[in-house]
Image (cartoon, rainbow, N blue to C red):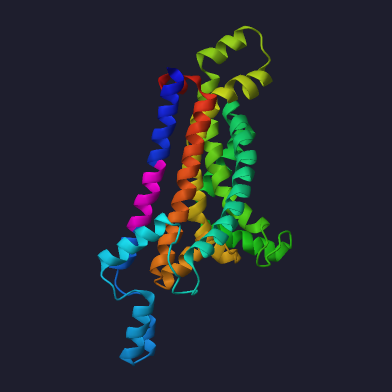
Amino acid sequence: MARSALAGLIVRRCAAAVAFVMIVACTAFLLVRLAPGDAVTDLQIRVADPEVIAATRARLGLDQPLATQFGRWLVGLAHFDLGQSSTFGRPVTSLVAARLLNTAQLAGLALVLATCVGLPLGVMSGARPDSWLAKSVTAVSLVIAACPPIIATLILLWVAVMTGWLSVKPGSVALPVIALAAPVAAMLERLQSQSSAEAAHSTSVLAAAARGIPSSRLTWIHATRQSLRPVVGVYGVVVATLFSGSIAVETITDWPGLGRLTLEAVQGRDLFLVSGCALAGAVLIAASNLAADLLRLAIDPRLRSAA
């Protein structure tokens, strides 16, 4: 019975993820289509011949009614055909797939780096909040978390140019990874610190301390295992933060990812490319939220019993 309830919960989460992706993609399509201007707006400024403009609009399918365009896009979406990019003259599916892999690589490395830095620092600052280390880490985390991604990236770029510690060549991965990981690490440190401080005063940890378990084991095993449960739940939001921050980071560092492609699509009023980028971003966020939910179910028996 418990297994069937758990399977039902997983099915509901998967259905919610699919619904989220479809809502985001359809909303992006409709907003771009209803917004003033389209892919031939710049052509209208440069070219005075109305026949050329009309032929271009017909070739791109922009002369069709909204309902017809939206219906054809939905049919194509069912066959994994996201249309043709007016900016690049290529199928949107291949463009988005290539850039999505680049962004996934960047976000994955940034997430690993942020986790390896933020969580241990959060455990240490939460276990001894009055120490000089905890106060220093807290001050640095608050500054980094409050810094906008574009400012942090520009600062890192300046440091890299002045010191030569990091490569600033297009395609170099270290600089954009650090720029994306720094604010996420700061956020995870603050969350883990608060959760660790609460776990240290919980009944189970106090009972373990009364049995004579060493303080290091209490901090890194008992309290950390308990404090990770609420932190894991925000990893879906963390991936959304990485995706939103990647637009500025990828543009400044010249990284060929999905965030930079989204900006180019918006600037070119590329209807199908904007929709495809929104769809890919929604898939990343939905998949990460689903993975975080499944991980919470795996490490927290209370959630499994509640299912």
Residue found farthest to the top: 211
- Indicate whether residue 20 is drawn in magenta: yes
In depth, the one of 280 and 117 nearer the eye is 280
Q: Position of residue 31 (x, y in %)?
A: 31, 62
Residue 301 is left or right of residue 115, and the answer is left
Res 231 visible: no
Residue 57 is left or right of residue 2, and the answer is left
Residue found farthest to the right: 164
- Which residue is found at the position 48% from the left and 65% from the top? 92
- Which residue is found at the position 60% from the left and 48% from the top? 108
Residue 140, above or below 218:
below
Residue 63, above or below 155:
below
- Number of marks in picture: 0
Residue 216, above or below 152:
above
- Indicate whether residue 262 is drawn in magenta: no
Q: Quadrant of residue 79?
A: bottom left
Q: Which residue range is magenta in the image?
A: 17-27
- Which residue is found at the position 47% from the left and 33% from the top? 293
Q: Position of residue 95 (x, y in %)?
A: 53, 65
Tell me the quadrant of the picture where the N terminus can be found.
top left
Residue 173, above or below 265:
above
In depth, the one of 242 and 6 nearer the eye is 6
Most frequent secondary structure within the magenta stretch: helix
Res 65 visible: yes
Q: Position of residue 118 (x, y in %)?
A: 60, 39
In depth, the one of 230 and 94 nearer the eye is 94
- Which residue is found at the position 56% from the left and 38% from the top? 189
Q: Quadrant of residue 117?
A: top right
Q: Position of residue 193 (x, y in %)?
A: 55, 32
